[in-house]
Image: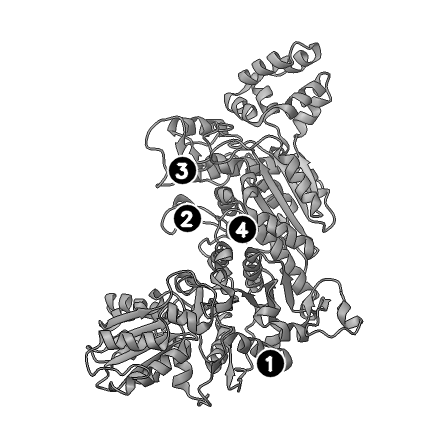
Amino acid sequence: MTANLDALKTIEQRLLWLSAWTIHNANNIRPKEDGAIKVGGHQASCASMVPIMTALYFHTLRPEDRVAVKPHASPVFHAMQYLMGNQTREKLENFRGWGGAQSYPSRTKDVDDVDFSTGSVGLGVAATAFNSLVQDYIHAKEWSKDMKLGRQVALVGDAELDEGNVYECLQEGWKHDLRNTWWVIDYNRQSLDGVVHEGLWEKIDAIFKAFGWRTVVLRHGVLQREAFREPGGEALKAWIQSCPNSDYSALTYQGGKAWRKRLMDDIGDQGDVTKLLDKRSDEELDALMNNLGGQCLATLTEAFDAIDDDKPTVFLAYTIKGWGTPLAGHKDNHGGIMNNPQMADFQKKMGVPEGEEWEKFATVDDPDALQAFLDEAAFFKDGMRRYTAPEVKSPGPVWLDDRELATQAGFGKILDGLAKSRSELADRIVTMSPDVTSSTNLTGWVNRRSLFARREVSDTFKENSIPSAQKWEFSPEGQHFELGIAEMNLMLLLGQAGLAHSHFGERLLPIGTVYDPFIARGLDALNYACYQDARFIIVGTPSGITLAPEGGAHQSVGTQLIGMSQDGLVSFEPAFLDELSIIMDWSFDYLQRSGENDPDERTWLRDETGGSVYLRLSTRPIEQLGPRNRDDEEFRRGVVDGAYWLRKPGPNCEVVIAYQGVIAPEAIEAAGRIGNDRRDIGVLAVTSADRLNSGWTAARRARARGHTTAVSQIERLMAGVPRDATLITVTDGHPATLAWIGSVAGHMTAPLGVEHFGQTGTIPDLHRHFQIDSDAIVAAAQHLSAGRRIRLAGS
């Protein structure tokens, strides 16, 4: 395919201008005075990406390809979408402002065609690799054989390669035979605080090759390569390749005269080199020395066109930070913005008339011809590439009848039941775990549905008739990803699988399991997945200090608060199996919702928008409460809404115990003991402090807006509790998880929970030590509530 370099050059110049003008025009970063370099605009950071993005989007890419645009290239991306009619002038004029185009590309907040949200550096890069694995997974299934395989492309800042998650991703990709992935590294050798170390590209090259990637180094543009063929050219090439990064940056900023002096001082006394330099004006010499591979459209299009297979490929594109602008090469230009005189000079250089700054084709000689070229650009030709997928109906809750069982074991049995059902919902579930598949009770599911790989791999133990509880068979039909131990990879894969309906038009229901304390190890990627509005279930198990023998390193304390505070994620912590069955069934529906942002006027939760779900489960077996009426709509609704009365308080209630999770036996026992001496004891079973709290704050905001009758679930539950009753909250986690309930109706509250690292011991030992056992609950009622003295155990 031959590139139309004239048309691409015109687009390149329009993008360079529009992106620079967009930043300069932004109200919150516009220069207020005339100085050297203003900080905050990232004009230099995005300029180096203009040629790369021009070559990719207007020559190489196809609609099935997906691109993660590096954060600081956002203005170039928005300018490009503006040229194509997918972005509005109003939003560009309000760049970085309220309701305007976003500082970093956002799937959820921008109106243009963003494939991957970026901003938390490194995560968008790795997301492309995991999106490729999701694409392979879908393509291997019978229900999606006809899908086109696209390239998953990341535009990467060289400083992003400092992020550890990039290398965790490389290893996982190697394990899963990664393909159809391109990373284009903007190797401008400048980061926020300095210049990149010499020789970094050699390390980058070695690392990628070690993991099976093809590396393509784009160091010199066409002008430089032609100059190298002239007499004296080899000496010039050797000088360029040995020049320290800091020197090259400084000379770039200083311009043609500085280049000439330095080159003459270093190598110009050789006749051929002197002639090579003398035949070029200062302006021409400056253009030559700035003609690196990543700034040359001919070099870029040739390199991209040369790849005709699916091997993962990294392009190391040498660029100049601030290319084409007065900020080029300056070491302080990372957040730089041109001052007003600089911008005025730049506008003259670009030939943009005053008053036509926002005109798409302001400097174009033949607008009709350019428009015709844009209309034929393959990547954009099919319009916006956001897909939808039909909703997959749940066959209903999988009920369990065990008399005593842990919620973690119950989760495994529910999935096993779904695996046996052969329902469409089960066929769309994909599970994944970071080397804890068996210890988080996924074995039953995996034994029935097998592990995913593009090529079949048999179970050696099975072939040799060696007994094993695990049937580890890999095949394209498999429905489980076995990952390495890096939790960041789990969260990134969950996020990309949870966007399959939008990226590929096929519905997946991803479920990931992780040891609950290590939620925090993947928290950045979890937040990133939620920010993209990915849909998945993350199961944190085992949790809390009830994992007593494992010690403090494996006992989670603050994860309940993570679940409550993470936007886009609804957290639950059921105590009993029937609660878990109801929650999981509801969750499969919730993952697939995409309705309006209108609140449910019963709970004031915006459930119709849907989201992801976090289940905090335990390995502690507890006795079940016996058969309950599973058709009781009030009970089922209470479980989903966040709480219900396990023991409803009477009109003379003196004490209410509110618990969440597997501390339920202690709460129930304490209520019975307190009830011997106090009246109308209430026991509130909390299944989701998150939903209770969210509904409460939403109802308060609604009342402030004039909805005077707005009442949340927790307000409704607490309305009948006498004002002078004492509230005791207890959970195997941080006490703040439930402590806020006392503020709902102004009750004196004793919050019991865990605030420090755990330690080894038995469950009774730890419950006693942290004062969350039944004795501690009874003691709290004794000391904080008025009334008859409560008889303690043994008295």
Where residue 50 sits, quadrant-wise, is top right
In the displayed orientation, state which residue is furthest to the front.
Answer: 794
Where residue 628 sits, quadrant-wise, is bottom left
Can residue 543 be seen here? The reply is yes
Q: Amino acid at mark 4?
A: Leu
Q: In the image, 640: left or right of 704? A: right
Real-space Cα distance between discs 2 and 4?
26 Å
- The percent coordinates of residue 761 (x first, y second) are 47, 68
Q: Amino acid at mark 3?
A: Gly
- The percent coordinates of residue 443 (x first, y second) are 63, 72
Verify CB contact (< 8 Å) between mark 4 and mark 1.
no
- The percent coordinates of residue 534 (x first, y second) are 51, 62
Verify CB contact (< 8 Å) between mark 4 and mark 3.
no
Crowd around label 3: few <14 · some 14–19 · many ≥20 (10 Å): some
Helix, strand or loop for disc 4? helix
- The percent coordinates of residue 746 (x first, y second) are 22, 71
Where residue 604 sits, quadrant-wise, is bottom left
Helix, strand or loop for disc 3? loop
Q: Residue at label 3?
A: 40
Real-space Cα distance between discs 2 and 1?
50 Å
Real-space Cα distance between discs 3 and 2?
19 Å
Of 89 and 604, the residue lying toward us = 604
Of label 3 and label 2, which has the lower sequence position?
A: 3
Compared with 75, 706 (above or below) is below
Compared with 131, 620 (above or below) is below
Verify CB contact (< 8 Å) between mark 3 and mark 2.
no
Rendered image: mark on residue 626: none
Q: Amino acid at mark 2?
A: Lys
Quadrant including the C terminus: bottom left
Q: Residue at label 1?
A: 417
